[in-house]
Structures are given as structure tokens and as C-alpha cells.
């Protein structure tokens, strides 16, 4: 079986098109994924894979994914999915708990666009015709309500005390050099996630963005970095961000904060140990590993980060999924070393992270894999809605500063939350913020 395809001229901006497709109701499940210049909508489920603790069967690899891919009914597939943070614990031999760890789906239909042309794909003529009709019929340009939800971003759950507890561990005899500790912020009312995604994407400068209603996960996110990128020619890249200062909107103040970030020994140490571990993770599956960029500064929404890029060439006896397993979770979202950080994070945060600090990803039949780190994201599940943000704790950390860093990050999403009752329409065409720094 192969997808039926048709190419169309672009009639509207990609963000508005993706939001309209998500709202269409044509598919029970869908995923939107922005990867650089390409935006993709994937709807419906032709085939899916769900992995939990039992499905891994005691293995510490993703061979179950490789077996599933080999059995797919289409040859020109692209897979969309997500990986929970606890998948990393399972791969490290640590009990991940009872939550779902990985959900992958091959869609019934897809729409991909770079803003110039639109590729429409479906497994049958009927769905292809319906998708083509949707693409050719622009929606109502009336904007959504300007009303926004304003959650309380100050810590009410003892985050500073938890940071102090991490510092006790870091100054002790154990192996830990760094721990990323996060906190949740409740959103008091249900949201329209599609309108929130549009509003948030217009204001943010993500490396990747996504909107999900897939495998029980409902989320909209503006990822600042990728966990793993595997190209068709077997290059593997990871782009760790560690070290943070706010963006204020004042060019002079932002420049001062940038200089402060580049000169702060704590932030530079935090970044350096993260890059070192990323290189070590790459070396497990790659040859010719090196740092392509080091200590640049990336602007991501309401914050700016120290950034680096590490690269390797995937060995002939290794697969893209083995590369993903080696790099997952991101070194900037777990700890150093990773394995002893898992139980400490679980104990101090008091609950599984689920999708937070996990990945949203795509993989295609050419061997190309792209996995975005799930940060700067709003989650909605079982009548609850929340944000989550963390900070990297090293020996030089101060609880008050780490708390303020989480507030700076939360504002990237918190300022753009559209309540469900007020968001019947998609915002009209307008400027979408773009990242002016090379990714």
C-alpha cells in the first residue's frame, strides 16, 4: 500500500492552515508538528504502537519499535508520536511506573506545507478528497477573543525547599553533578488548545512546535531544543540548551542580561557538563563525534539560553532508534548522570512527569528522525490543565534564582492561554515570530 498524493498551491499561512485542520473534526486523533520550514498535520490512525512497562518485556532498548516498523502496511510512511519522560528511566533499568511510555502512530491522512506548496496525502481517495477540500477552503478570518487566562506563577508547593534538598545531594558523596528539577502550575479553567497554540506560536521563537490530541495526550508546545535529529545521510545531532536569562523586551536590558549569562561561571559550568554528557551519549552509537557550535545564545520566547550543537555519524550497525534511545531524555531535562537522577526527581516532584521533558517526534521510511524536547508546553488531561517548568541545579545554584528561572520560562506559555469558552475562532493571518539565530 502507498499513499495517494496531490500537490496544491498554498492558499494561507501554515499556522492558520494547521489550526483549521486540527479544528476540522475529520479525525479522532491528530498531531501538528512544525520542523523548521515545514509544518505537518497528521490525522487518524492507520497503525499504532503503544509501549508501557509490560510491553518493553524487560528489555532496555527500542527493538519493539523496529519490529513494529517492519510490519507496517505502507512503505512510504511517516510516523508521529510522543515519548514520556519515564521511558528514559525504563531504558536505564529504573522502574518507570505504570504510565504509558511511548505512543507512535502512522496517520490515515497528512497535510505538509512549507508555505509555498501543500502536499496532501491519504491512504484512500475519499479521505484525500476531503483533505483537499479543507485545504482549498480557507476558514473564517475573524480573530479569537483577546481574553487570556492568567495562572499564578509563584511557587506554592515548596520548590525552593526541593532545590535545597537537591543541593544537599550534590554536595554529598554521590555521583550527581546536576539535577533538573521542575514544578507544575495549575491553570484554573479549561483551554482551547488550538487557539492557545496559535496565540503562543505567534509570540514565541521555538526550535519546534506541536499540537497534539494523540494517544490520550492533549498538549500544545513551543519546544526550545531538539533531543535528537537523525538525517537521511545518518548524521545525528543534538542541541542542548543550558544556562538561562530572561528576555525583557528592552534591547538594552536584554543585551546586558546576555552579557551576564555569557560571563556567569555557574551557567557556563551547567552548560559545559551538559555538552560533555551529550557527547558521551552520542559516542555510544556514533563515530566522528564533535561540537559543531559551542556557547552561542539562542532566544526562545521570554528567555535566552546558552546553546551548543553536538554531532556524530551513526555507525553502520546502529539505527536511528538506537540513537534516539542513547540521547533520550535530553541531558538538559534529567540529570548528570541520568540513572541516579530519576528516583531523586520522582521523589522530590512527587509524581510522574509524563510527557513533560519527554519528546514529540517524527520518523519516516528514509530513516529521518526528529525529536523535540517537551518544554514550554501546556497540558490538558482528565479535566485538569497545567504548565510545568524546571531549572538545572548544580552546586553553585541558589534556590531563589532557580525559582525565578522557572517563572521566566513559564511566561513563554502563560501569557497566551485562551479559555475554551472564549475561543471559537482561529486568529487571522498575522506575523509569526521567527528565530533569527541559526538553529
Image: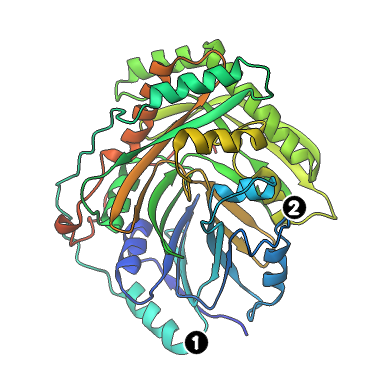
Q: Residues within 10 Å of mark 2 (few under 14, many from 20)?
A: many
Any part of residue 160 in sight:
yes
- Give residue 299's position: percent from left, percent from top: 44, 31
In this picture, residue 137 sits left or right of residue 173: left
Relative to 411, say whether 256 is above or below: above
* Residue found at x 38% / y 54%: 219
**Disc on the earlier residue, 1 or 2:** 1
Q: In the depicted view, which residue is nearer to us: 47 or 296?
A: 47
Q: Which image quarter holds the C terminus? A: top right
- Give residue 409's position: percent from left, percent from top: 38, 32
In this picture, residue 304 sits left or right of residue 293: left
Secondary element at image label 2: loop
* Residue found at x 59% / y 25%: 178
Residue bearing mark 1: 124
Q: In the depicted view, which residue is nearer to us: 268 or 167?
A: 167
Residue bearing mark 2: 234
Q: In the depicted view, which residue is nearer to us: 287 or 332?
A: 332
Amino acid at each position: 500500500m502507498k499513499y495517494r498524493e496531490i500537490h496544491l498551491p498554498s492558499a494561507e499561512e501554515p499556522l492558520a492552515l494547521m489550526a483549521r485542520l486540527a479544528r476540522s473534526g475529520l479525525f479522532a486523533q491528530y498531531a501538528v508538528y512544525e520542523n523548521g520550514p515545514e509544518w505537518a498535520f497528521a490525522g487518524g490512525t492507520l497503525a499504532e504502537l503503544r509501549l508501557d512497562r509490560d510491553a518493553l518485556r524487560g528489555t532496555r532498548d527500542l527493538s519493539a519499535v523496529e519490529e513494529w516498523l517492519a510490519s507496517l502496511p505502507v512503505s512510504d510512511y511517516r510516523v508521529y508520536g510522543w515519548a514520556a519522560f519515564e521511558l528514559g528511566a525504563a531504558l536505564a533499568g529504573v522502574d518507570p511506573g505504570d504510565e504509558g511510555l511511548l505512543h507512535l502512530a502512522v496517520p490515515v491522512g497528512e497535510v505538509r506545507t512549507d508555505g509555498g506548496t501543500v502536499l496532501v496525502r491519504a491512504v484512500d481517495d475519499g479521505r484525500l478528497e476531503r483533505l483537499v477540500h479543507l485545504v482549498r477552503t480557507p476558514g473564517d478570518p475573524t480573530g479569537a477573543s483577546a481574553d487570556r487566562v492568567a495562572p499564578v506563577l509563584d511557587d506554592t508547593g515548596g520548590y525552593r525547599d526541593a532545590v535545597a534538598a537537591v543541593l544537599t545531594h550534590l554536595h554529598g558523596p554521590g555521583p550527581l553533578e546536576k539535577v533538573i528539577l521542575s514544578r507544575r502550575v495549575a491553570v484554573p479553567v479549561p483551554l482551547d488548545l488550538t487557539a492557545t497554540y496559535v496565540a503562543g506560536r505567534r509570540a514565541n521563537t521555538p526550535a519546534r512546535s506541536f499540537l497534539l490530541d494523540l494517544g490520550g495526550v492533549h498538549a500544545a508546545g513551543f519546544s526550545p531544543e531538539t533531543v535528537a535529529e537523525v538525517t537521511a545521510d545518518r548524521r545525528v545531532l543534538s542541541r542542548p540548551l543550558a544556562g538561562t536569562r530572561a528576555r525583557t523586551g528592552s534591547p538594552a536590558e536584554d543585551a546586558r542580561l546576555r552579557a551576564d549569562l555569557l560571563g556567569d561561571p555557574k551557567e557556563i559550568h551547567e552548560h559545559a557538563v551538559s555538552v560533555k554528557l551529550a557527547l558521551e551519549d552520542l559516542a555510544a552509537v556514533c563515530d566522528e563525534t564533535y561540537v559543531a557550535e559551542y556557547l552561542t545564545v539562542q532566544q526562545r520566547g521570554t528567555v535566552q539560553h546558552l546553546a551548543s550543537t553536538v554531532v556524530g555519524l551513526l555507525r553502520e550497525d546502529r539505527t536511528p532508534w538506537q540513537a534516539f534511545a542513547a540521547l533520550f531524555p535530553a541531558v538538559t531535562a534529567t540529570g548528570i548522570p541520568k540513572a541516579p537522577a530519576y528516583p531523586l526527581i520522582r521523589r522530590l516532584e512527587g509524581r510522574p512527569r509524563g510527557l513533560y521533558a519527554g519528546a514529540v517526534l517524527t520518523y519516516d521510511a528514509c530513516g529521518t528522525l526528529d525529536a523535540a524536547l517537551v518544554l514550554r508546553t501546556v497540558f490538558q488531561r482528565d479535566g485538569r490543565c497545567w504548565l510545568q517548568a524546571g531549572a538545572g541545579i548544580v552546586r553553585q545554584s541558589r534556590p531563589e534564582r532557580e525559582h525565578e528561572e522557572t517563572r521566566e520560562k513559564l511566561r513563554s506559555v502563560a501569557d497566551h492561554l485562551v479559555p475554551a469558552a472564549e475561543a471559537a475562532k482561529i486568529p487571522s493571518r498575522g506575523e509569526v515570530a521567527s528565530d533569527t539565530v541559526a538553529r
